[in-house]
Image (tube, helix red, strand yellow):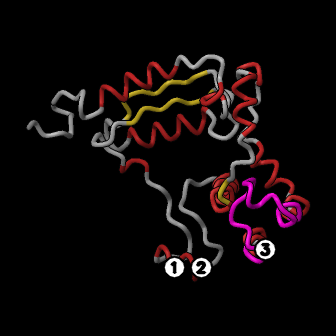
Amino acid sequence: KAVMKVLDVLRVYSMFDSAVTSAAMKIVCRYFPDLCEFAESFVITKDPSLDDQKSFEVYTAHLPSGASVQSLLHYAQLVNSGRFELFDWGSGSANREKYGRDKPPAVNLSKITGMVPVGMFVGTVDDLGDVTDGEWSRDQIKKGGDAIRLYREVLAGHATFMIGKDMGYLDEMVDLLRQYSSSHRTTGSDDPVEPE
């Protein structure tokens, strides 16, 4: 809550973008170094040998590219609370205004049904979305039906999905997209598209 107030007073709504590489950003990082280190973790993979050096240089040449402060605060909230819930607006009255209750409601992944086919590619060395989180999300979605069409654990960190040496998972991803895109779709008992 204190971080939200300070950032709001300083009118800092995004971090690490060209518009905010300023004195305000330096102040934020001086008083909240964990927040800045956390934002940097989106760029750095725990095992750099997985990433292509030239791709990494191209990727980082576009940095800082910006991150929403609200997104970073929401992620920190999820980590600290241990719950998968909507954004906490910082007070019961603000949450009541948004959600009709004092606390933010949990996100119910079991409401994702077979109408929305889901493919999950989970990095085994991703500190931000680890295998435990991937398995939990998959299992919650499965409670709602047969939406999970593919669950694959890939030797990858968070950035590896964009700059990895081995991008072989993309072939499987493209095949999955083709299988469920409307131009390649065939009708079947679990297919949400009505025959024309």
User: Distance of mark 2 from mark 3, alpha carbons?
Assistant: 23 Å
- Mark 2 against mark 3, which lies toward the viewer? 3
**Corner quadrant of residue 174:** top left
Mark 1 / mark 3, whichever is N-terminal: 3
Image: 142 above or below 50? below
| Secondary structure state at the residue bearing disc 2 | helix
Question: Mark 3 and mark 1 in contact (Cβ < 8 Å)?
Answer: no
* x 30%, y 31%: residue: 180
Q: Measured along the vertical axis of the image, is residue 131 above or below residue 27?
A: above
Q: Which disc number belongs to residue 92?
A: 2
Q: Which residue is mark 3?
A: 10
Q: Are marks 2 and 1 in contact (CB under 8 Å)?
A: yes
Residue name at image x 86 percent, y 58 percent: 29
- Residue type, label 3: Leu
Residue 43: percent from the left, percent from the top?
73, 38
Q: Amino acid at mark 2?
A: Gly
Total tally of numbered discs in the picture:
3
Q: Residue 72 appears at what percent x and percent y?
A: 68, 56
Report which residue position mark 1 lands on.
96
Label 1 crowd (10 A; few <14 / some 14-19 / many >=20)? some
Q: Could you tell me residue 76's position as x and y percent?
A: 69, 55
Residue name at image x 74 percent, y 37 percent: 60
| Disc 3 element | loop
Q: Residues within 10 Å of mark 3 (few under 14, many from 20)?
A: few
Q: Residue at x 73, y 74 (%)?
A: 8
Foreground tag (1 vs 3): 3
